[in-house]
């Protein structure tokens, strides 16, 4: 039977320890109870998948020293301190040293259960993030290039590897931002042509007046401004792979020239008469069905369409989103020599409930901004308050529930701070929140106490 989480409970008073253990078990937790710090430390190993709940005042090693040694052994371990009323100042200081929260004696069992549940959720999320990071770092080959564990991505990888070794034309279909060029690069890298050049050209991004010269090259003096010979993309890609992105944008007269070059295996530079042999593989990419595109020649389509690959939209493989997002956050952080930011539970839910109209390109952009701006909130990056979409009232159903709840919660805290002019104790009493919880929420939502008091205090004293 699946438990709510694992708890390592330490208390030297047998009656209190037994009663707390029984209550937590009834609440659905797996509990290991110890009467002193020594046996508890023996159970702590890197990757420990639970939380530590310890009394502060114990003979021998007290709860504070136990916490310090536990955090040295298991960095990031949530530690909940059980304290007497007179230990509040000490417990508050312990939180600055890494404690997750503290519970005053005598405590209400329901509150202890609620605090432990949040701590277990945090620990579970932390371990999952670590697992994802290790998983990405250990991936090699195609798994290291195309990130995703969904059924559709596994199928795409298998089809790609099967086609890589077959020297034929391929058409890649996919929405904007799904990674068509990356898939084309993989086809090249895992093919016998990998030692040759991979030459990409976006047919929709080059002016029509220049694309012919880009593809076929030109001789000096072929036209005004052609002061020297230029090698075209087809010639440069000989021995390797030519990738034609947005091929549906290619002008009709160039489609004819491209078909002839592929059929005969030769190109002629503009202004030249000498046929130049080329040996290349053409991989094309399109957003629309080329067979039903009236502007695209059927004969060129049949020349290119020896095989097809279809890249799923990100919304159709939403289970891959956390892995992808963490991959780009880790990569961006490493490039800029920063510690990678961790995703909260709210962040994960927000990621998986977003529609991702821009697909992986949008996700990569959001991940990089999230990695570089530690004060930014993921919900704000996905749903910017000042965007044109937010200039009008948004119907509740147009945003994920988690985003709506976060926005409501943030405004409630801000309103309370305004009413009490930044008096944290008054806010705690009004909202009936633990000090630690309010601090976490203010940090999550970018709420600065100084905005309500006029001083420069950034966190609760």
Image (cartoon, rainbow, N blue to C red):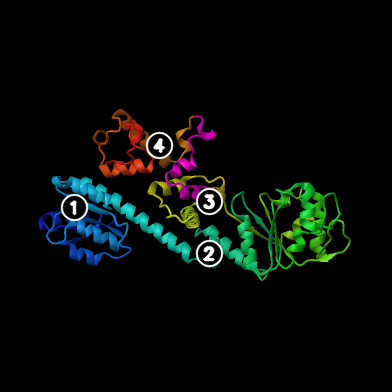
Secondary structure, mark 3, is helix
Quadrant (top left, top right, bottom left, bottom right) of the N terminus: bottom left
Mark 1, residue position: 23
Query: In the rendered structure, which disc, 4 or 1, sits on the residue that comes first in sequence?
Result: 1
Tell whether position 234 is magenta: no
Quadrant assignment for the C terminus: top left
Q: Is residue 442 above or below residue 68?
A: above
Q: Which span is picked out in magenta?
A: 365-392
Q: Which mark is residue 407?
A: 4
Q: Residue 38 location, x and y as percent?
A: 18, 65
Q: Is residue 192 above or below residue 382?
A: below
Q: CA distance from mark 2 to mark 3?
A: 18 Å
| Nearer to us in this view, 94 or 176 | 94
Picture quadrant of residue 214? bottom right
Q: Nearer the viewer, mark 4 or mark 1?
A: 4
Give the answer, above or below, for where 175 lies relative to 217.
above
Mark positioned earlier in the residue sequence (4 or 3): 3
Q: Which residue is the site of mark 3? A: 364
Closer to us: mark 1 or mark 2?
2
Position of 217 relative to 427 (above/below): below
> In the depicted view, which residue is nearer to us: 27 or 50?
50
Secondary element under disc 2, as helix, strand or loop, is: helix
Q: Which residue is labeled 2 in the image?
A: 143
Residue farthest toward the right in the current orientation of the protein: 273
Mark 1 is surrounded, within 10 Å at the Cα level, by few (under 14), some (14 to 19) or many (20 or more) other residues, namely some
> Where residue 263 appears, x then y in whole percent?
81, 63
Q: CA distance from mark 4 to mark 3?
A: 24 Å
């Amino acid at each position: 039977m699946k438990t709510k989480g694992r708890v390592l409970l330490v208390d030297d008073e047998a009656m209190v320890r037994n009663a707390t253990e029984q209550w937590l078990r009834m609440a659905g937790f797996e509990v290991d109870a110890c009467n002193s710090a020594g046996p508890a430390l023996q159970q702590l190993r890197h990757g420990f998948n639970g939380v530590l709940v310890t009394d502060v005042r114990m003979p021998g090693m007290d709860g504070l020293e136990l916490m310090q040694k536990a955090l040295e052994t298991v960095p990031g371990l949530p530690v909940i301190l059980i304290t007497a009323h007179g230990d509040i100042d000490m417990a508050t200081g312990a939180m600055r040293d890494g404690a997750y929260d503290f519970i005053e004696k005598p405590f209400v069992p329901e509150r202890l259960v609620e605090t432990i549940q949040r701590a277990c959720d945090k620990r579970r999320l932390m371990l999952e993030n670590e697992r994802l990071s290790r998983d990405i770092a250990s991936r090699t080959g195609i798994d290291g290039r195309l990130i995703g564990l969904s059924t559709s991505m596994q199928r795409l990888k298998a089809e790609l590897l099967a086609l890589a070794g077959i020297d034929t034309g391929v058409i890649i279909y996919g929405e904007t931002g799904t990674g068509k060029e990356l898939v084309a690069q993989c086809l090249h890298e895992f093919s016998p042509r990998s030692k040759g050049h991979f030459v990409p050209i976006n047919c929709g991004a080059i002016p029509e007046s220049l694309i012919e010269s880009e593809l076929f090259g030109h001789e000096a003096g072929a036209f005004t401004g052609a002061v020297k010979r230029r090698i075209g993309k087809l010639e440069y890609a000989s021995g390797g792979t030519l990738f034609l992105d947005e091929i549906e944008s290619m002008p009709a007269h160039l489609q004819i020239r491209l078909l002839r070059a592929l059929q005969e295996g030769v190109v002629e530079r503009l202004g030249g008469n000498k046929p130049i042999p080329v040996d290349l593989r053409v991989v094309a990419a399109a957003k629309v069905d080329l067979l039903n595109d009236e502007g695209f020649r059927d004969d060129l389509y049949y020349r290119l369409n020896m095989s097809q690959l279809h890249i799923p939209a990100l919304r159709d493989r939403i289970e891959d989103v956390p892995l992808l997002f963490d991959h780009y956050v880790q990569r961006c952080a490493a490039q800029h020599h920063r510690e990678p930011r961790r995703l909260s539970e709210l962040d994960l839910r927000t990621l998986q409930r977003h529609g991702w109209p821009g697909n992986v390109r949008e996700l990569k952009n959001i991940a990089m901004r999230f990695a570089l701006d530690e004060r930014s909130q993921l919900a704000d990056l996905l749903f910017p308050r000042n965007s044109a979409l937010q200039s009008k009232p948004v119907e509740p159903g147009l945003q994920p529930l988690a985003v709506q709840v976060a926005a409501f919660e943030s405004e409630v805290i801000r309103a309370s701070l305004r009413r009490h002019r930044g008096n944290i104790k008054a806010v705690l009493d009004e909202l009936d929140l633990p000090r630690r919880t309010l601090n976490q929420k203010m940090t999550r939502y970018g709420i600065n106490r100084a905005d309500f008091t006029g001083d420069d205090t950034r966190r609760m004293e």
